[in-house]
Image (tube, grey):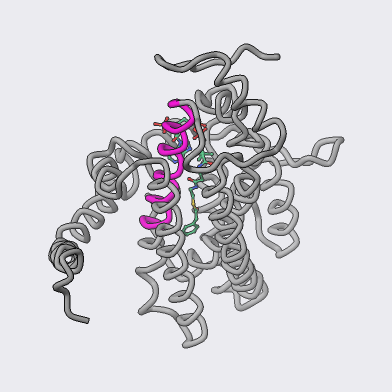
Amino acid sequence: MTQPKHIAEGETAEQHAAFEARIRNGEKIEPGDWMPAEYRRQLIRMISQHAHSEVVGMLPEGEWIDKAPTLKRKTILMAKVQDEAGHGQYLYHAAETLGATREEMIEALLTRRAKYSSIFNYPTMNWADVGMIGWLVDGAAIKNQTMLAGCSYGPYSRAMVRICSEETFHHKQGKEMIVLYAQGTPEQRQMAQDALNRWWWPALMMLGPHDADSPNTGVLSQWGIKLKTNDEVRQEFLNEHAPELLEAGLTIPDPDLHQDADGNWKHGPIQWDEFWAVIRGERGLGNERLATRQAAQDEGAWVREALEAYMNRAAKGEAAD
Ligand code: FAQ
């Protein structure tokens, strides 16, 4: 048996061993169950950052709702952006089951103590970016989230099952749009290609640093939260998307891209300096994204106050219908 790691003060090796045995047996850990403090901390970190990503992720595409080229595309995009808000809600609730409050999580986002996905700090320059986000960003998210649907924490795993089915629709609508444009007029083909040039590398990066540079993967794998490493998920994404993009007639902006003898597609070097700079808000739209979230928080204060007043009156049996 592996020596249990991350034993916090007040926890015993026996408790850890019993906990890990449950995970090995494929049992789900539920909110009231005993769990190591580090398991709880890692899950709150990851689930809250995932929730923030879904909510901030509404911004790049949301900008295009009133510019959609047809009513059908507008309706699809509105539904997609609303879905992302719903995903944020499921995920905040999942994190709340671990004892994190909504206020603490939002505060951590707005003060940059919590991250959100790097991908949403890139700008959407034209309509084809909406389709490319669906195809590549939702495509990468699904690979990651299908894996997380099998994770050891019950509420997160169940939220992922529901979210993945909606993301699958998002992925299909993006692919359908880009394949259509890639076969369209020269202008449409160019729009699709430009969008691919902008989103290809950020989509590869969003799956996280290489395994050797990923400090959290070890413990997350040990406790059945991550069932695959960042590089394994990235490989799955590449193997599905590289041939499909090429088949659509698009050029992937990577001169080193090739398929190896085992059939795996291999990418060239990723610019990790760009990834970290984007996360820190030194490149891309990080500062604008957080300012938008802060404004939404400020403008929503009266709703939270009214709700709290209502709940207080309801608790005393005074609230009207
Ligand atoms: N951006 O040790 P690792 C979506 C951070 S949802 C920013 O490898 P881990 C839906 C990481 O937090 C997309 N930071 O970390 C949608 C850690 O920093 P910390 C979001 C990143 O947790 C589609 C540090 O680097 N999905 O797209 C990123 O083991 C379209 C070291 O990294 C999720 O959140 C990044 N890309 O693995 C919505 C899924 N990558 O926290 C709208 C859940 C890494 O120690 C439109 N999360 N970092 O300060 C996960 O699966 C994992 O957290 C990973 C990172 C795989 C993201």
Out of 238 and 157, give the one closest to the viewer.
157
Residue at 41% x, 37% y: name it: 45
Q: Would you identify the image quadrant in which residue 297 lies?
A: bottom left
Q: Would you identify the image quadrant in which residue 10 lies?
A: top left
Out of 71 and 268, give the one closest to the viewer.
71
Residue at 70% x, 51% y: name it: 242
* Residue 260 percent coordinates (x, y): 81, 36
Left or right of 103 on screen, residue 25: right
Q: Examine the residues drawn in magenta and state their main secondary structure.
A: helix
93 shown above or below 77: above
Out of 206 and 285, give the one closest to the viewer.
206
Left or right of 164 on screen, residue 133: left
* Residue 81 percent coordinates (x, y): 43, 68
Q: Would you identify the image quadrant in which residue 317 lies?
A: bottom left
302 shown above or below 152: below
Left or right of 310 on screen, residue 202: right
Out of 212 and 197, give the one closest to the viewer.
212
* Residue 109 percent coordinates (x, y): 29, 44
| Numbered range of the magenta stretch | 37-57
Q: Could you tell me if residue 159 is visible in this image?
A: yes
Residue at 51% x, 27% y: name it: 216
Residue at 66% x, 37% y: name it: 227
Q: Could you tell me if residue 117 is visible in this image?
A: no
Count of numbered circles in the view: 0
- Magenta segment includes 252: no
